[in-house]
Each structure stands twice: as structure tokens, then as C-alpha cells.
């Protein structure tokens, strides 16, 4: 591993709007936060950032090189050569302890007292890592990003952190990144967990993203992003889930259907913390993501693939069909009425199953 420099500055663990670029086999990096040994009983108070690909650019899938890629990340537990990498969903961040509490903590599947856990904000995201605006400034144009680009940055981050072997766990877009890890870096992956994610985007899932991006482009400045989020929330839940939680009249806006005020709230909440350019870039990357049947059959690492019984975005038949092509995969189904978001909302049984899988020997 090549040398890198460290300084003492740190960034608060908030959710800033976007950031910069990427590379393939760089030679050095500069840390903007010390790699501290974190107390395993509590999550870190601060977000760390590192600038990668300073001396050698990352060649993006589109053929364009980028340098000085900023990556925002959290680490949990004692640093070591083997790590558990958590890959986040579309609008996620590197703060796993905030968005996956059902799986994170002592005695749980993601246990910082047992494992060295790492999560970074994806390239193109807007929670501290290099985003589309910065990439456009460097490249002189908007360059399409792919999940392979995002995973290449994660791989370089782990190299800088001294990690030589990794277990990768992710749900939704994070699960698609796990598939990319298995394709791009099979020799580095000890085992993997894919939750509620396909190996390639269907016309149904792609169509939903096309409509969301059209809303953003027709109404830039935030209103389109609100509508995109409202559409997405309908695909993240199920009819049964919404019947259970959003029936009748709104408690906060009498005379309005509960579902209307719920969707309005969800749109406003995302618009306040997310970047519309990131939303477009990341959904476009999801839409072009595709592993062939032959590539799936070439993956030999142990994999747990989880389908969600009521998922209308990535139906269980689709998830299970892709899992069936993996030579060393187990398929397990999370039974929940809450649709795609059950991996976040209704995850107690998921925690048990993932914990069992991650602690298998051999």
C-alpha cells in the first residue's frame, strides 16, 4: 500500500450538499481526518473525509479521468485488515448507525465490538463525497456515472484504510453495489449480503426513475425533486402498508387524505437535504446497471440474497431469479407488509438472518 498524508481536521457528521471525483489504481491519498481507533460502544461523533486519486486519476466507465476525489465515510470498531463494508441506498449516507439501527450495534449483524465496519457516501452523492457539480467542473461537462465507478472509489478507500479482505452488505441501491463488488473485485470479497436488490434494473424500475428525472428537469430548483420523492415513496411501500399507516384523514391537515400529507412531508424532507443533480446521476447509474447471466454464474463467493415478500419495486420473483444464478447463494425472504422499505422499517428478523450468515465459519 502506498503512503498517504493525514491532517487533524474533521467534518461534522451532518448532511452537506454535494462534492467531487474518481480513479482506478491511484498512488497516494490525503486524509482530511485522522483514522482514529473508535470506541466500540458508541458511534463516532464526526464524519471523516479523505481525498483519493491525487497522483493517478480514476478512469470512469465513460472513459474520462478524474482526480482528487473526496470521499465522506464513517468507520466503526478497531481498524484491521478485514472489514465489513456497508453500501447505502439511493438517498443514504455513510452514517450506518443512523439509518440501519435494527442491524447496527453490539450483538447485532453489524457489530463494531466484533468487526471493523466501514461505510462511505457514494461518488455522485451529496452527503460529503464528490458530487455531480464538482465532477462537471473538473470534466467540463456532465459525465455519466456507473455503479462500477462508485465501487472503484470504495475499493480505493479500503486500500487506504489498510483493508485487504471485505464482507459487503447492502440493501436496494446498496445491494446493487454488492453485486458490482462481486463482479469487479471477486478476489477481495469473503462473503456478501444483498437485500432487496436485482442484478439488473427492470423496465418497471427504470421507468419509475425516468418519470422522477422528468419531474426534476421540468421543475428544477426543488419542486421536481419533491415530486420525484413522492413517486419513489409509493414504490418503496406496498398497498397493504399504506392501508395500515396512511388511511383516512390527515391528523395534521384535517380535510386532507392522510396519504396526501404523508407524501408532501416526504417530498419536503428530501428536498431539504438532497441534491437534485445527485438524484438524477444516481438513478441513471442504477438504470444502466446490469450483470449478465454468465457474470452471475461466475460469482463463487458465499452470498445471502434477501427478497422482501411485499416489494413492488423489486419483486421477489425477480430477486430470487437472479439469486438462483449464483453458484454459492442462499435465498431468504423477509416477510413484511411494508414493501421495499421493510429492510429499514421492519428489520428485526433480517438482523437475525444476516447475523447468522455473517458468523458462519468457512
Image: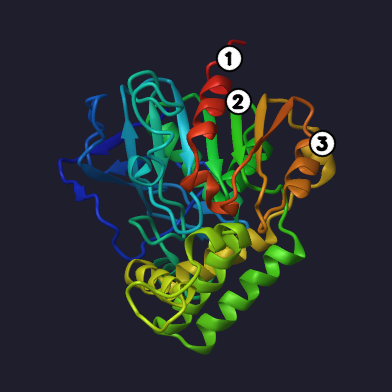
How far apart are labels 1 and 3 at the CA level?
22 Å
Q: Is residue 341 left or right of residue 69?
A: right
User: Do the numbered discs 1 and 2 sit on residues whose CB atoms are within 8 Å?
Assistant: yes
Residue 145 in view: no
Q: Circle 3 — which element? A: loop
**Residue 360: which numbered mark, if any?**
1
* Image spot of residue 272 (x, y percent): 32, 71
How far apart are labels 1 and 2 at the CA level?
10 Å
Q: Earlier in the sequence, mark 1 or mark 2?
A: 2
Decide: is 241 above or below 32: below
Quick one: label 1, few (<14), some, or many (20+) residues within 10 Å? Answer: few
Q: Circle 1 — which element? A: loop
Residue visible at 73% across and 46% down in the picture: 316
Check disc 2 and report the residue beneath it.
191
Check disc 3 and report the residue beneath it.
325
Decide: is 61 above or below 39: below
Amino acid at each position: 500500500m502506498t503512503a498517504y498524508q493525514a491532517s487533524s481536521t474533521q467534518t461534522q457528521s451532518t448532511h452537506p450538499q454535494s462534492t467531487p471525483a474518481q480513479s482506478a489504481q491511484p498512488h497516494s491519498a490525503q486524509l482530511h481526518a485522522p483514522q482514529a481507533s473508535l470506541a466500540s460502544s458508541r458511534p463516532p461523533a464526526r464524519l471523516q473525509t479523505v481525498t483519493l486519486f491525487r497522483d493517478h486519476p480514476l478512469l470512469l466507465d465513460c472513459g474520462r479521468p478524474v482526480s482528487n476525489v473526496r470521499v465522506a465515510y464513517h468507520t466503526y470498531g478497531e481498524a484491521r485488515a478485514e472489514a465489513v463494508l456497508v453500501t447505502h441506498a439511493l438517498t443514504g449516507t455513510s452514517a450506518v448507525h443512523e439509518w440501519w439501527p435494527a442491524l447496527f450495534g453490539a450483538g447485532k449483524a453489524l457489530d463494531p465490538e466484533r468487526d471493523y465496519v466501514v461505510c462511505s457516501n457514494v461518488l455522485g452523492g451529496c452527503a460529503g463525497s464528490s458530487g455531480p457539480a464538482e465532477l462537471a467542473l473538473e470534466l467540463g461537462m456532465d459525465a455519466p456515472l456507473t455503479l462500477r465507478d462508485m465501487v472503484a472509489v470504495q475499493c480505493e478507500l479500503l486500500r487506504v484504510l489498510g483493508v485487504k479482505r471485505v464482507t459487503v452488505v447492502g440493501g436496494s441501491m446498496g445491494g446493487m453495489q454488492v453485486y458490482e463488488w462481486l463482479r469487479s473485485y471477486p478476489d477481495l470479497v469473503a462473503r456478501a449480503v444483498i437485500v432487496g436488490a436485482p442484478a439488473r434494473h427492470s423496465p418497471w424500475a427504470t421507468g419509475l426513475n425516468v418519470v422522477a428525472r422528468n419531474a426534476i428537469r421540468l421543475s428544477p430548483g426543488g419542486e421536481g425533486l419533491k415530486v420525484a420523492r413522492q413517486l419513489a415513496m409509493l414504490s418503496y411501500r406496498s398497498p397493504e402498508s399504506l392501508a395500515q399507516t396512511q388511511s383516512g384523514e390527515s391528523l395534521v391537515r384535517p380535510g386532507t387524505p392522510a396519504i396526501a400529507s404523508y407524501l408532501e412531508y416526504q417530498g419536503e424532507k428530501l428536498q431539504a437535504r438532497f441534491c437534485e443533480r445527485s438524484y438524477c446521476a444516481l438513478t441513471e447509474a442504477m438504470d444502466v446497471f446490469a450483470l449478465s447471466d454468465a457474470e452471475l454464474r461466475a460469482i463463487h463467493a458465499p452470498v445471502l440474497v434477501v427478497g422482501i415478500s411485499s416489494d413492488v419495486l423489486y419483486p421477489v420473483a425477480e430477486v430470487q431469479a437472479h439469486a438462483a444464478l449464483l453458484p454459492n447463494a442462499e435465498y431468504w425472504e423477509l416477510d413484511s407488509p411494508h414493501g421495499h422499505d421493510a429492510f429499514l422499517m421492519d428489520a428485526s428478523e433480517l438482523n437475525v438472518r444476516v447475523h447468522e450468515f455473517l458468523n458462519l465459519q468457512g
